[in-house]
Amino acid sequence: MTLGDLRAAVEKTGLAWRGAFHPEPADNVPAVATGVPTATMILLGFTGSDGWRAFAASHEAQDGQADPLDRWSRRIIDDLSVSVGAVALYPFNGPPPPWHSFLRWGRKCEPLFASPLGMLIHPKWGLWHSYRGALMLSERIALPPPEIHVDPCTVCATKPCLSACPVKAFSNGSFNAGDCRDYLESSDGQDCRKNNCQARRACPVGAEYHYAPDQVAVHMRGFMDGFAT
């Protein structure tokens, strides 16, 4: 199977192709099977709201059960892995924390950089992207050379993301989760809860790829639920 075949199969699912790489031992990529190392790793996810409608129209999004996005991702990627002869892997389950290194792997696939908010920023998608799973193949697929881009944060003089947060939760390279949680749970936090984090929205890179309202609701609910864990 060629890279083009794999990419076409991924994009038919509604998920975005997030790049591929050839794992090295330091990447801690699991084996495809006992004694069979992973030769090619493909990451899948969302870029902006591309593909979100595929999830929103699914029975998982409408059945009222817990973790609809994770369940949809697992169903879609499990089926895809069977069709292309791969093994599926997910960022939302795995060994005890720290879980699988999707953010590290993402930086081997695409031009991603650490933003002042701690999230990885993409030169095109900005802060509006995510990972939903991966495909591990025993076959070494020929890959194009990595794209070269300038870190967009290094040429951003004003850093509006840092001044936009109402409670200054981002400062000195750290995130004050307590202040963020208290604000989100207050009546003043409605704007962030409904429209996504004000600091994230202030970033000019990829602003046109801001998540759709129902996508914001799912991600913000998951973010707030994370405070309780």
Image: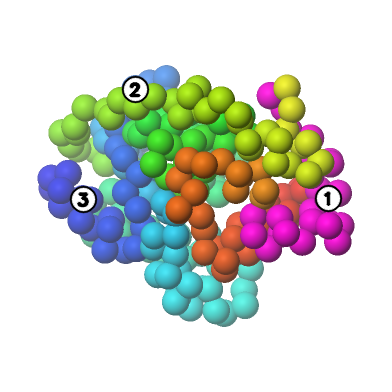
Within 10 Å of disc 1 (Cα), the crowding (few <14, some 14-19, many 20+) is: some
Between marks 1 and 3, how big is the CA–CA gap?
44 Å
Q: Is residue 195 magenta?
A: yes
Q: Is residue 89 magenta?
A: no
Dot label at residue 24: 2
Dot label at residue 183: 1
Camera-side residue: 95 or 221?
221
Residue underneath mark 3: 6
- Is residue 181 shown left or right of residue 39? right
Within 10 Å of disc 3 (Cα), the crowding (few <14, some 14-19, many 20+) is: some
Q: Can residue 38 be seen in this view?
A: no
Between marks 2 and 3, how big is the CA–CA gap?
21 Å
Residue that appears at 21% across and 50% down:
6
Mark 1 falls on what kind of element?
helix
Picture layout, residue 69 above or below residue 17: below
User: How would you classify the magenta stretch by its main secondary structure?
Assistant: helix
Task: Write the start and end of the magenta stretch as one range.
Answer: 173-196
The amino acid pointed to by label 3 is: Leu
Within 10 Å of disc 2 (Cα), the crowding (few <14, some 14-19, many 20+) is: few
Across and down, in percent, residue 61 comes to: 53, 73
The amino acid pointed to by label 1 is: Tyr
Across and down, in percent, residue 171 comes to: 74, 27
The amino acid pointed to by label 2 is: Glu
Picture layout, residue 155 above or below residue 52: above
